[in-house]
Amino acid sequence: MGRLLGLAVVLLCPAISSAAVIHVTPQVTDILNADFTPADPEDIVSLDPFHPVLRPRAEKYMVQIDVWMRIEDLLPGQGGFGNAAFNLSLHPRLSQNPDLPGWQPDSSCICHGWPLDTLIPKWADNGDFGPSGSDL
């Protein structure tokens, strides 16, 4: 009887412990000059969101990368999910912008309650909570 119960627990655990699938897609959304003005369109050979091509120049480019996440396969009865954590490592030829370093959180608000005049932050915790200040 004990072996049968053990086998049942082992067979049922994967179904019970399944997690959501999170698809993470980084996309280049803007190419800027060091002063945050848009780069000259002639310097942008291709603005493919996954592989932009820029003309070489003496001045450095700033590249805005938005990270999109799509969540699928939540367990039945789950109303949402509680947390997503990730770390971005920079390629050796890339560096953070010294004028705007680190994680730049989305601080936008959404309407909540009735009447729809109460604004609350879209994200409860949105920041770089890791131990390193040199990553994103």
Image (cartoon, helix red, strand yellow):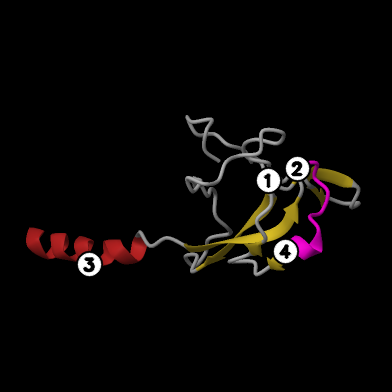
Q: First in sequence, mark 3 or 2: give its number.
A: 3
Which of disc 3 and disc 4 is earlier in sequence?
3
Q: Secondary structure at mark 1?
A: loop
Q: Nearer the viewer, residue 13 or 47?
A: 47
Part of the protein shown in magenta: 35-43
- Please rate how many residues cluster around mark 1, counting C-alpha atoms within 10 Å: few if below 14, some from 14 to 19, many from 20: few
- Quadrant location of the N terminus? bottom left
As helix, strand or loop, the secondary structure at mark 2 comes to loop
* Sequence-earlier tag: 2 or 1: 2
Disc sitting over residue 34 in the figure: 2
Residue depicted at x 65% and y 35%: 101
Whole-percent x and y of residue 68?
Answer: 62, 60
Residue 6 lies in what quarter of the image? bottom left
- The correct choice, above or below, for 60 with respect to 54 in the image is above
* Dot 2 crowding, Cα within 10 Å, few <14, some 14–19, many 20+: some
Q: In whole angstroms, how far apart are the C-alphas of marks 1 and 4?
A: 13 Å
Image quarter (top left, top right, bottom left or bottom right) of the C terminus:
top right
Residue on which disc 4 sits = 44
Instruction: Tell me whether circle 4 and circle 2 mark residues in contact (CB < 8 Å).
Output: no
Which SS class for mark 3?
Answer: helix
Task: Count residues near mark 3 (Cα–Cα under 10 Å), then give few for <14, some for 14-19, many for 20+.
Answer: few
Q: Which mark is residue 11?
A: 3
* Residue at 15% across, 61% down: 5
Q: Are marks 4 and 3 in contact (CB under 8 Å)?
A: no
The residue pinned by badge 1 equals 60
Inter-mark Cα distance, 3 to 2:
57 Å
Q: Is residue 64 above or below residue 126?
A: below
Q: Secondary structure at mark 4?
A: strand
Earlier residue among tags 4 and 2: 2
Q: Amino acid at mark 3?
A: Leu
